[in-house]
Image (cartoon, rainbow, N blue to C red):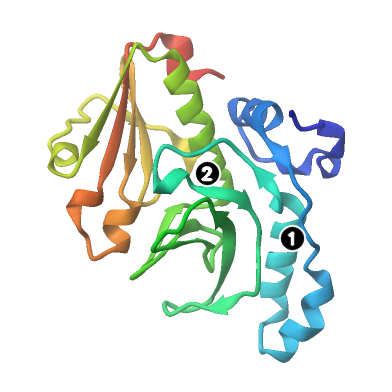
Amino acid sequence: MNLNLGLLHGGSILEGLSQRARSFVANHGVRADAPPLEPYREQWTALGVPGEVIDRAVAYQERWGGLVLPPAPVYESGPRYLCADLPEPAREGGWWFMGGEPRASVAFGFMIGPNGEFGLRGDSWVPLHASVEGWVESLALARHASFWAKQVTRLHGDEVEALSLDGFEPVEEVRGIADMWWRGPDSLVALYNGEAECFSGQAAFRVALVYAGLDEWGLRGQ
């Protein structure tokens, strides 16, 4: 079931995305019903949640709530769907709220950070991307690269540490922080450090996916 662009709140869900990510969401996304959060404003205000934080959660739900996207290659396939809930004060300062409902039982949660970052909350808070748009861009790029690559190699732990990225450039649209994509002459590399940083820097949780044998369209797809 493809998303009807005319039903996407005037297309606002696609704003700020690359053409590749826009096509990914439009062709592979499904929008489920998500309850509006505005009716909870009075209750949340009484609990001490600042008005501007409630505004952020309400806006997130209006734009992204209920969006179901294809599984991610890591983090137990990522959120089952995007949604917000009651904001909570972050240990590091500011406020965060849930960014998506997990597909499976996991030891972390998908959260939107105090500055709009999309990340994991486990033993510690780890922002993966500077925004939820970055997460969506990463999903779109993973699907694109896996389709066009002649070979896909998955690396773990020390294998990731040994990976050389000489001659590669960062893929800026994923807005990477803990996680990042790199583009080389004929390959794309996705680095996933979220779980390693979330659980006391355990290197064994680091994952890299190398998509090799790409032509210019495969490398960029824009």
Q: Quadrant of residue 45?
A: bottom right
The relative height of residue 12 versus residue 203 in the rendered view (above or below) is above
Counting from the top left corner in percent of width and height, residue 91 is at 43, 80
Name the quadrant of the C terminus.
Answer: top right
The residue at which mark 2 appears reads as 134
Residue type indicated by callout 1: Ala
The residue lying at 52 percent from left, 65 percent from top is 113
At label 2, counting other C-alpha atoms closer than 10 Å, the crowd grade (few under 14, some 14-19, many 20 or more) is many
Counting from the top left corner in percent of width and height, residue 149 is at 38, 15
Counting from the top left corner in percent of width and height, residue 178 is at 35, 51
Q: Is residue 158 left or right of residue 131?
A: left
Asked whether 75 or 45 is in front, the reply is 75
The residue at which mark 1 appears reads as 59
Asked whether 31 or 221 is in front, the reply is 31
- Residue farthest front in this picture: 105
Q: Specify whether residue 187 is in view.
A: yes
Residue type indicated by callout 2: Gly
Q: CA distance from mark 2 to mark 1?
A: 17 Å
